[in-house]
Structures are given as C-alpha cells and as structure tokens.
C-alpha cells in the first residue's frame, strides 16, 4: 500500500497504451445542504427540479416523530403533492424492497422521491427509484455473485436523502444494502446512478436518538472511515477499461481527506453524543458531519473485511434483540454488525499499511499512549471506544459461538466486491480466524 503522499504521476506512463497498472481513480458525491433547519427547505429544493408529485419514504418510528409530515408541509408550500409511505423496514430485505416498489408502482407515477430516516429508508428509496424507473427485477441489479449486477440504463428520478441517524452516510453513496431472506445474507446494489440528487443533513433530526442507536450508528461511521482509509490504494489494482470502473476504486487522495476529517470529528464528539446527546447539539452536529464525510470517503474508496463480515452476522441472526431498537423480531443493527470483528480485522490488515493504521489510531484517540506492539494500537483504540459506548463484546454477545463460524464464512466470502478492496489478500482461512478471534473482543 502506498503512503498518503503518493503522487498520481508515479503510477505509470499515461501515454503508454500498454500500461497494466491503474492510473485513474474516481470520486463523486451529491450536492449537500447541511445545518440546523435544512430539512424545512426541501420544498424549495425539489421545486427546482420541476417535481409536482413526490413520494416520501420512511419507517414507522420516524413517521411517529412527525418529521416526514413536516417535509410534506414544506413540499406543499411549493405546490408539490406528496404522499408518505411509512412501511420501510429497519434493516431492509428483498421482501421489504419489493413491498415498497409495489406500493410506488400502484400509486405512481412520481416525479421524485424523498427518503427520511436512517440508511434503511435511504436505501429503500434508492431501490424504489431504480425499479420504478428502469426495467427488470431486483435480482437483475443485485451485485454478483448473488445477482446479475445489471447496469441501470437511464438516469433515475430526483431523490433527496434526509438522514435522521448519524451513521450510514447513505445520503452520500451510490449503493443500497439489503438482506436476501432465502440466502440469509446481506448484499447490495451499486452504481453511480443510485447516488441521491441532493443530501439534506439536519442535525436537529438526531437529537432524540436513544444512546444505543447513537452508539451503533456511530460505529458504522468509524468503520466506514477506517476501512476506506486502509483500503487498497487505487493504483495497486490492475488497469480497468472505462466500462469496468466500479464504485469502489480503492483509497485515493480525495477520499483520504474526508476520512481523516471524519475521524477527527469522531474523536471529539462520539462519546459525548452517546452519553449526553439529548443536550449536546454540537456533538450531534459533529457526528452528522462525520457520517456525511465518511460517506464521501467510503462511497468511493470502498470498505473491506469488517463490512463483509457484518453482512452474514446481521443476515443470520438468531435471537438477539438490541436495546433501543424495535423488539418485534431478532436483528443485529448494521453498525454493531460491522464493528464486532473490526479490531481483529485491522490486526490482519496492519502489515499491508502500517502507517495508515497508526495514523488512524492517532486521529481517533490523539491522547492514547503508544503501545509497544504497533499492530495493537488501532485495535486497542477501537476496543476502548466500544466498551465505553456499550457495543456488545464480540459476535458471541449477539448469539454466535465457535460452532457458528463455519456457517458465517461463506456469507463473508460472497462479498467479493468488498473483499477485493482489502489491502491484503484474504480467503476463507483468514476470515474464519478473524471470526473466531472476534467471539470476544475483551
């Protein structure tokens, strides 16, 4: 892996048609409107796109808070008719995507969409936008090897993403994630056309989040920033043809900037947001900004082992019901799922990019004493943080034991889109060892 100062000009002779190493990286993000009260201006924003009939997608919990109705009122002030669909499932599935698409098809057509909620609502809206605009079925667009990874053939409708949790960064990214129920695995759809038209980030919408949700969502930010910062450097990949360029291109100079800034914000505000979030708007603002910045980083650079492991951990859940979340069925929140193997994953990836791992540890915990074993610096920072904010102690704390590890490994190995971004080659043996060593983290 290359260090932070690698010069793009070092990657090869740009004039040589036979060059085999990659010399190009891509970066993209939607326009951003950020700040207290930003969500009250969405009517004006969507009116600029000529929208006259809009579907607002949210989940029952957010709907009960009245936030979607406030946005409907804003839309109607600008002559836009809006309908609310509040059937989004927290941790969406192929079935919940299908239900949302069915509703949108039956009640449409629509000139645009507004997603209000966490990553589940935003991801559902991305899928609805795709499947009501382009031909085909859900599995046509799901990433390989689970789906066919079909490319959307046309521009989608305007989509405004309004996050109500500081975590997923989905308002910045060009992918959506879902559980495939029949396979008990998470996967996703990834293409630049899915990226929202506008991200509207209003920190006031997060003030009432329970501490447990704040902690889990915040660990998603941490993993986004760390995984993309330590991802394989973009120029260390083989040369791609233009039509082969993927959303996750590897760590690069632009994504690095956003990840570093996100980690700095996390260091100063994450613990405060968990323990005192109801009365600390500054901490809430910092965490919303960190989520957006990390989304701008990982949405282009990519994530790797912790997220790849997180998909089967969430998809194969048995009886675990986390505090602060709906209790009607078992679930491992996404932010918890990706964090549970992170300490061990970064022990594994350390040799490929020691400077990156040490710099990340310094950004997340500037005052942390230096350990004699540098490979332990980042894992120790993570464990200290996770213990402080109440994250479960490894995959054992959410219901998995030694005997479950062989069943989890295949789910991880299906996430080749993510694993290919790891700075070290990783196979079944390495994933099994990481999972076993993550049954308890402390």
Image: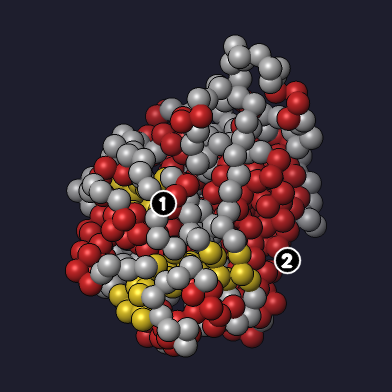
Find residue 268 and name its label: 2
Q: Residue sitting at 26 percent across and 42 percent down?
A: 140
Q: Earlier in the sequence, mark 1 or mark 2?
A: 1
Q: Disc 1 and disc 2: Cα gap in Å? A: 39 Å
| Residue 265 x, y percent position in the rendering | 70, 63
| 196 shown above or below 253 | below
Left or right: where 350 falls relative to 89? right
* Residue closer to the observer: 9 or 297: 9
Picture coordinates of residue 408, whole percent (x, y): 34, 42
Residue under the image location 52 percent in, 25 percent down: 240
User: How many discs mark residues in the rendered view?
Assistant: 2
Above or below 12: residue 181: below
At mark 1, the secondary structure is loop
Q: Nearer the viewer, mark 1 or mark 2?
A: 1
Q: Is residue 403 visible?
A: no
Q: Is residue 311 above or below residue 35?
A: above
Please report the residue visible at 32 percent of the width from the left and 79 percent of the height from the top.
Answer: 83
Q: On the image, numbered disc 1 is attached to which residue?
A: 155
Label 1 Cα neighbours within 10 Å, binned few <14 / some 14-19 / many ≥20 = few
């Amino acid at each position: 892996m290359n260090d932070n100062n690698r010069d793009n000009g070092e990657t090869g002779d740009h004039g040589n048609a036979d060059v085999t190493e990659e010399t190009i990286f891509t970066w993209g993000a939607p326009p951003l409107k950020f700040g207290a009260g930003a969500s009250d201006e969405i009517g004006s924003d969507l009116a600029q796109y000529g929208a006259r009939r809009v579907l607002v997608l949210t989940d029952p919990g957010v709907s009960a808070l009245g936030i979607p109705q406030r946005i409907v009122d804003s839309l109607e002030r600008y002559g836009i008719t809006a309908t609310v669909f509040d059937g989004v499932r927290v941790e969406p599935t192929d079935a919940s995507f299908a239900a949302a698409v069915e509703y949108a098809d039956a009640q449409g057509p629509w000139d645009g969409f507004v997603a209000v909620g966490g990553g589940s609502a935003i991801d559902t809206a991305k899928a609805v936008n795709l499947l009501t605009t382009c031909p085909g079925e859900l599995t046509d667009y799901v990433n390989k090897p689970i789906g066919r990874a079909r490319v959307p053939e046309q521009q989608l409708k305007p989509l405004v993403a309004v996050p109500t949790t500081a975590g997923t960064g989905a308002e910045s990214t060009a992918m959506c994630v879902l559980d495939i129920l029949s396979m008990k695995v998470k996967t996703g759809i990834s293409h630049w056309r899915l990226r929202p038209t506008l991200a509207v980030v209003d920190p006031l919408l997060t003030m009432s989040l329970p501490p447990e949700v704040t902690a889990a969502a915040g660990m998603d930010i941490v993993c986004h920033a760390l995984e993309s910062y330590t991802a394989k450097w973009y120029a260390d990949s083989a040369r791609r043809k233009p039509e082969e360029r993927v959303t996750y291109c590897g760590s690069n100079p632009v994504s690095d900037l956003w990840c570093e800034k996100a980690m700095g914000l996390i260091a100063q505000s994450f613990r405060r947001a968990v323990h005192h979030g109801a009365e600390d708007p500054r901490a809430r603002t910092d965490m919303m900004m960190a989520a957006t910045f990390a989304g701008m980083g990982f949405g282009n650079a990519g994530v790797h082992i912790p997220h790849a492991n997180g998909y089967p951990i969430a998809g194969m859940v048995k009886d675990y019901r986390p505090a602060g979340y709906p209790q009607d069925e078992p679930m491992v929140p996404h932010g918890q799922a990706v964090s549970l193997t992170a300490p061990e994953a970064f022990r594994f990836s350390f040799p490929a990019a020691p400077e990156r791992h040490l710099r990340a540890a310094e950004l997340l915990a500037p005052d942390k004493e230096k350990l004699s074993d540098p490979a332990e610096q980042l894992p120790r920072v993570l464990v200290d943080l996770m213990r402080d904010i109440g994250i479960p102690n490894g995959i054992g704390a959410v219901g998995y034991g030694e005997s479950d590890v062989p069943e989890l490994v295949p789910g991880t190995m299906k996430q080749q889109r993510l694993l290919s971004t790891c700075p070290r080659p990783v196979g079944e043996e390495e994933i099994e060892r990481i999972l076993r060593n993550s049954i308890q983290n402390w």
